[in-house]
Image (tube, rainbow, N blue to C red):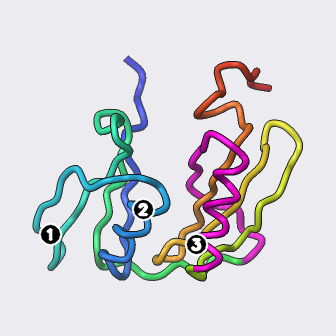
Amino acid sequence: MRPTLTHVALHVPDLEPCIRFYADFCGMRVIHERAGKGSKIVWMAEPGKEHQFIFVIMPGGQARHLASDDYSHFGFAVDSRERVDAIATRAEAAGCLIWAPRDEPYPVGYYCGLRDPAGNYVEFSYGQPLGPGSEALPIP
């Protein structure tokens, strides 16, 4: 059997704002929590994907200070351009929008980017050959 990617673990400076961000913007929910690192450690997943891929979020990390041209990010697919626009509007009001919605040639598609409370970049995209509706798109 080959290895399967199951999780990403993040140390963050302040746990609760990160939990709220990933719940509010990404639709993830806490599926497990336990004591650890002087606070608690949480596992978050998208509903229905709890056994496929999770974020493990732990306190005690340093804030990330990524450059504006650093495109390191977590990517979430959404089901329409309008959904990208709606997320960008909410993020702008919350002060965490870093990349306004934009179109890029295939396979990048239409996307926007946010900064989570720990400084990680998070992309929301439509039209990539990944995620909702991707079955009809070829992978280059």
Name the element at disc 3.
Answer: strand
Give the class, few, some or many, for how many residues have Cα within 10 Å of label 1's Cα (few <14, many ≥20).
few
Looking at the image, which is closer to me, 139 or 11? 139
Name the element at disc 2.
Answer: helix
Q: Quadrant of the N terminus?
A: top left
Looking at the image, which is closer to me, 109 or 8? 109
The image shows residue 42 at horizontal and vertical percentages of 24, 60
Q: Quadrant of residue 58?
A: bottom left
Instruction: Please name the amino acid that badge 2 sits on.
Output: Tyr
Q: Quadrant of residue 130?
A: top right
Q: CA distance from mark 2 to mark 3?
A: 11 Å
* For residue 26, above or below residue 127: below
Nearer mark to the viewer, of 2 and 1? 2
Nearer mark to the viewer, of 3 and 1? 3
Q: Earlier in the sequence, mark 2 or mark 1?
A: 2
Name the element at disc 1.
Answer: strand
Give the residue at x 59% y 66%: 121
Residue tagged 3? 115
The image shows residue 100 at horizontal and vertical percentages of 76, 67
Residue tagged 1? 36
The numbered disc on residue 22 is: 2
What's the magenta region?
68-93
Q: CA distance from mark 2 to mark 1?
A: 20 Å
Seen as rendered, the residue at the extreme right is 105
